[in-house]
Amino acid sequence: MRELNPNDPPVCKRTSNQRNRRNTSNGTITFERMETEHYEQLVEERTLELARSLDREKALNDMKAQFVSMASHEFRTPLSTILSSIGLIELYDGHDHVHNRAKHIERIKAAVFDLTSILDDFLTLDKLEHGKVAIHRSAVLLRSFLQGLLDEMGSLATKKELQVHFRYRGDKETVTDPKVLRNILLNLLSNALKYSPSGKRVWLSACVSDKLITLNVRDEGIGIPEEAKASLFKMFFRGENAVHIQGTGLGLNIVQRYVELLQGSIRFRSSKKTGTVFSVRLPVHIDR
């Protein structure tokens, strides 16, 4: 007979004494029956758990369907660019067309970068959805870290003739996850550059106090329409004034999730045709 566990569910017991033909005991058999009320509660809990699992699965399938729909549209432009540029490179034969070939090779590189960015966004989102993004704390010299990010974005700023300004105030060292912080800021900076017309300005500013880092990315770009602000951080959402610009609609959703992983918050203010400021607040030292 099994040992009873105090954590076992309530049961009703009935013991039967088994006898043979000589009327001597062969032992006893105990029949256990779970009480109806507890059994119904258990079934209800399992049903709710199954419903939640089905909801998660449906949400994941919906996300994948949205990605396929988005990708089928967003992939067309870079793929067309690649194919047309390859065709033109084949025509540009000889030393007289070195410049033209180089121009189209750069167009191919940019198109491949766009395709890679789309896939990276989706893979990152998939990892976040499944809780597979781990935080790795390390000391970061923030001022030089931020300057390095601006250097990475320098070619895009130069290409669009944008002025980029950097301001820093406070302590130099923080403890955070540099990879996650880098993804947050590269996304916000690339958006600021992408949605700003040529000749405009972009700012990155950082203020570090005893307990808080405040990072602001400001631009003089197209701005965010009032009706779009409530949905800005939703997956695949894009404002009406941004749909003509290459993008997945995943970036800001990913940024928000990354900020939460670093125990911070993000907010913004924006006016259409005037520009946008994203403000990220993070602890100077994250707990884990």
Image (spheres, rainbow, N blue to C red):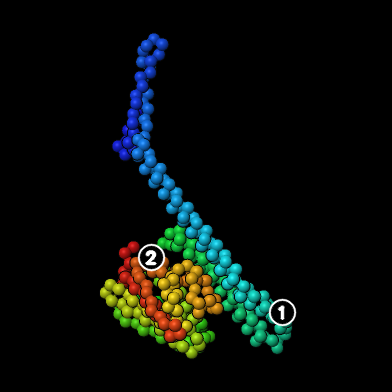
Write down the quadrant of residue 228 in the picture.
bottom left
Q: Amino acid at mark 2?
A: Leu
Residue 122 visible in the snapshot: yes
Label 2, secondary structure: give it: helix
Mark 2 crowdedness (10 Å alpha carbons): few <14, some 14-19, many ≥20? some
Q: Quadrant of the N terminus?
A: top left
Report which residue position mark 1 lands on. 90
Report which residue position mark 2 lands on. 261
Rendered residue at 35%/70% (across/down): 265
**Where's residue 136, x and y in %?**
39, 64
Q: Nearer the viewer, residue 168 or 94?
A: 168
Q: Earlier in the sequence, mark 2 or mark 1?
A: 1
Mark 1 crowdedness (10 Å alpha carbons): few <14, some 14-19, many ≥20? few
Mark 2–mark 1 distance (CA, rounded to whole Å): 48 Å
Q: Nearer the viewer, residue 60 or 121?
A: 60
Contact between marks 2 and 1 (CB within 8 A): the answer is no
Rendered residue at 49%/81% (across/down): 195
Q: Amino acid at mark 1?
A: Glu
Q: Nearer the viewer, residue 218 or 165?
A: 218
Residue 255 visible in the snapshot: no
Label 1, secondary structure: give it: helix
**Side (left or right) of 217 relative to 81:** left
Looking at the picture, does residue 283 appear above or below residue 41? Answer: below
**Where's residue 248, x and y in %?**
52, 71
Write down the quadrant of residue 274 in the picture.
bottom left
Q: Quadrant of the C terminus?
A: bottom left
Rendered residue at 50%/56% (across/down): 58
Looking at the picture, does residue 222 appear above or below residue 133? Answer: below
